[in-house]
Image: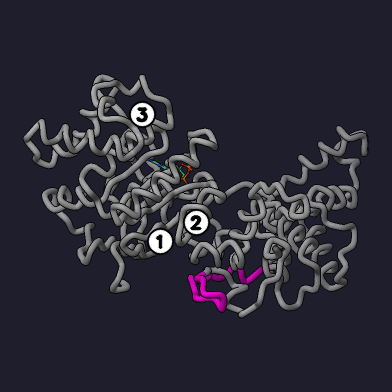
Amino acid sequence: MSSDSLLSVRGLKKHYPITQGVLKKEVGRVKAVDGISFDVAPGETLGIVGESGCGKSTAATSLLRLEEPTDGAIVFDGDDITEYDDTTLKRFRRRAQMMFQDPSSSFDPRMSVGESVAEPLAIHGMRDRNRRRRIVENLLERVGLSASDFDRYPHEFSGGQKQRIALARALVLNPDLVVADEPVSALDVSIQAEIISLMRELQAEFGLAIVFISHDLGVVREVCDRVAVMYLGEIVEIADTETLFEEPQHPYTRALISSIPTPDPSRRGERVELRGDVPSPSNPPSGCRFHTRCPEVIPPDQVSLDQTEWRRVLDLRLRIDKGVDVEDVRTFLVAEGEADAPEAVSDDAVEAELRREFDVPETLSDPKAETVLSQGLSALVDGDDEQARRTLAEAFTTVCERDHPELEATSRGSTAACHLVDEGVTIDSPANHD
Ligand SMILES: Nc1ncnc2c1ncn2[C@@H]1O[C@H](COP(=O)(O)OP(=O)(O)OP(=O)(O)O)[C@@H](O)[C@H]1O
């Protein structure tokens, strides 16, 4: 842990058991958060970004122990809160608050907003009702509402106003840390800007540290001092905001950044398209979890194909690994008019169709790679799936699939988990250019 951290998270995991039957036998685990580590300094805003389902919300709730982590240490101001009992946990909860995305569901519709904002004060032992009221009225004004709003009810407020009230409630105990999970995602863009500027103002005033969770990189760039990028339960890159956006080192970060909408026509068309779905966190890919979709996946030394061709060959190989039903391909080709019956479809036509489906050229530009691919496809079409898998795996297994990359310092001052970084490769991709 760095000595100036307020919060230091090490190896945090949250796995959800997948159970079956009345006895609830565990048959697997959703590895929603799978060993993440980061620090947050007092007064700092750390962003956590990533696609839907990568584990951001689970990270948020686990790090405040709103859900029990499966493993890891969460050191807050010098103490590991995973070891806290109920009493010490309650004390910790005064100092670390959570804000959620949907302001509507954050409030009890039967309580006035003043009572809702004052509730944490009452829970933490402030008995004097008048004093609670004074504190809350003052706070309502600080978040841009008025003291007289105390007695009004949630349904009388707009989404943006409700998020102001949620902010007041998060701040009422004068915390050191707020974990905000998509706090502006449900709001119109103009209202988002208001809430963001309010959060920044209050952050400076209260000396707050914020963990800001969002899938919106535009917002994160505006709000955060540092950013952690998550993919399938892991952090793949952490850097200060400017470094991350100007010199992203992980291909996933580059892809996310390239997809931020831009009004500048000269920058359009540089979008890095991620092919394929996000794999399941219950069975994440081996090695680098991003290798099944990475647009910069490293070819083996002996393979001499450009990235596009190589990516396609690897996609085809990974698909064959999962299992391809050759009879289905024959039936499809009959439907396409290739032959009258499945058994009349030639082996060559099946192989050509498999290549076509993955945009693999009829003949690869690297003759040695072409020989192996042809042998693998022939074995598959002959019904020897095992031989096909073995042949293709021997020639086309990437380091990205084999070895899990650790987070390492890059020459740009960031930390990234990517074999391209291990190899000291300076990455120059369109997404890096101004
Ligand atoms: N209680 C639960 N039981 C089982 N699986 C869960 C549970 N909560 C979340 N998950 C799974 O864990 C993974 C991470 O979910 P999480 O909500 O943390 O992601 P996220 O990045 O916050 O996504 P989003 O932006 O859509 O909220 C997902 O695959 C999700 O389906």
Q: How is the image coloured?
A: one colour
Q: Position of residue 422 (x, y in %)?
A: 57, 77
Q: Earlier in the sequence, mark 3 or mark 2?
A: 3
Looking at the picture, tell me which residue is in the foreground, 207 or 71: 207
At 9% from the left edge and 39% from the top edge, which residue is drawn?
A: 126
The kind of residue on which mark 3 rests is Ser
Image height of 149 relative to 337, above or below? above
Q: Earlier in the sequence, mark 3 or mark 1?
A: 1
Q: Residues within 10 Å of mark 1 (few under 14, many from 20)?
A: some
Which residue corresponds to mark 3? Answer: 105
The answer to whether the residue labelled 2 contacts the one labelled 1, judged by CB atoms less than 8 Å apart, is: yes
Q: Name the mark on residue 163.
A: none
Helix, strand or loop at label 1? It is strand
Which residue corresponds to mark 1? Answer: 36
Q: Name the mark on residue 230.
A: 2
Q: Quadrant of residue 434?
A: bottom right
Q: CA distance from mark 3 to mark 1?
A: 29 Å
